[in-house]
Amino acid sequence: MISHMKQPPRDNIYQNRQMPSPFRFDEKVAAVFPDMIQRSVPGYEQIINGIQQLATKHVQNNTNCYDMGCSLGAASLAMSQGIKTSGCEVIAVDNSSAMIERCRLFVESYHHATPIKAILGDIAEITINNASMVVLNFTLQFIPMALRQSIIDKIYNGLNSGGLLVLSEKIKSEDDLIDQRLIDLHHDFKRANGYSELEISQKRNALENVLIPETISQHKSRLTQAGFKHSDVWHQQFNFCSILAIK
Ligand SMILES: Nc1ncnc2c1ncn2[C@@H]1O[C@H](C[S@+](CC[C@H]([NH3+])C(=O)[O-])CC(=O)[O-])[C@@H](O)[C@H]1O
Ligand SMILES: O=C(O)C(=O)Cc1ccccc1
């Protein structure tokens, strides 16, 4: 669906040498986001397709679905298009006004049956209730470490029994040598998608201390701590993975 967009504007944010500054989800990033995420995150499209499939199979009548850190709403749209039951609502939350404004336009430009409500807000503050599906698609990695457990706890408490959490993250390997190899493979992926060495290194610096990856076992421990009895990886490519947890 993202790939159906006619000529999404190209991400050339880091093409020219610039003063180092931390990565932010501002208007410049929002304007090129479909191209940026597609060319930067291995497996992004497969994960979005998996979210749609899971919504088709598991979203129950008259329940809520949440897309936390929705950016332009690709996962919201995938859930809405996947849902075959009635009386549901998809709640899409992001704390970047540039993203949320574009999210409203983006989702309304595609056919979808289940309504999507786009909210400007912090995922640490929103209420989750009567949920049959919650998606954190590459968002937890941007949340301060000290807040991560309480967000997962809140999701667990807001899910109905049998409800799903899809948690996608850039990850760190337990093994330093393997970690280095996964990072190399990711950089090869970016190079193959047209990013230059300068773009790769400037973005890497901008993401330092902004995107903080954890290991799969750290994520699984946090899920267990929240109460999830079931969780495992359902998708991984290089250092990008997606975990499915079931209440
Ligand atoms: N505290 C916060 N509260 C709300 N939103 C936040 C917060 N912190 C960061 N964000 C938002 O989380 C999103 C992360 S991008 C998600 C992609 C999307 N899920 C996708 O399926 O296309 C991932 C990436 O770019 O790697 C951004 O839009 C931030 O503004
Ligand atoms: O581009 C990268 O190196 C990433 O790790 C993924 C990413 C994608 C979009 C915004 C921020 C990080």
Image (tube, rainbow, N blue to C red):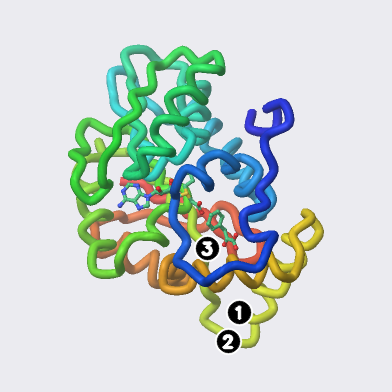
- The percent position of residue 124, horizontal first and vertical second, equals 23, 51
Q: Is residue 165 left or right of residue 73?
A: left
Which quadrant holds the N terminus? top right
Where's ligand 2: which quadrant? bottom right
Residue under pointer 2: 176
- The percent position of residue 231, horizontal first and vertical second, equals 41, 56
Is any atom of residue 211 visible in this view?
A: yes
- The percent position of residue 170, horizontal first and vertical second, equals 52, 63
Q: Residue at x 72, y 26 (%)?
A: 6
Residue under pointer 1: 179
Residue under pointer 3: 170
Measure the alpha-carbon separation of dots 1 and 3: 11 Å
Q: Secondary structure at mark 1?
A: helix
Q: Is mark 1 within 8 Å of ligand 2?
A: no
Q: Residue at x 18, y 39 (%)?
A: 127
Q: Is residue 9 left or right of residue 76?
A: right
Q: Amino acid at mark 3?
A: Lys
Q: Amino acid at mark 1?
A: Asp
Q: Is mark 2 within 8 Å of ligand 2?
A: no
**234 or 173, nearer to the observer:** 173
**193 or 75, nearer to the observer:** 193
First in sequence: mark 2 vs mark 3: 3
Q: Is residue 164 left or right of residue 4?
A: left
Q: Are marks 1 and 2 in contact (CB under 8 Å)?
A: yes
Q: Is mark 3 within 8 Å of ligand 2?
A: yes
Tell me if mark 3 has few (under 14), some (14-19) or many (20+) residues whose alpha carbon lies within 10 angstroms of its own.
many
First in sequence: mark 1 vs mark 3: 3
Q: Residue at x 47, y 68 (%)?
A: 21
**111 or 167, nearer to the observer:** 111
Tell me if mark 1 has few (under 14), some (14-19) or many (20+) residues whose alpha carbon lies within 10 angstroms of its own.
some
- The percent position of residue 98, horizontal first and vertical second, equals 42, 38
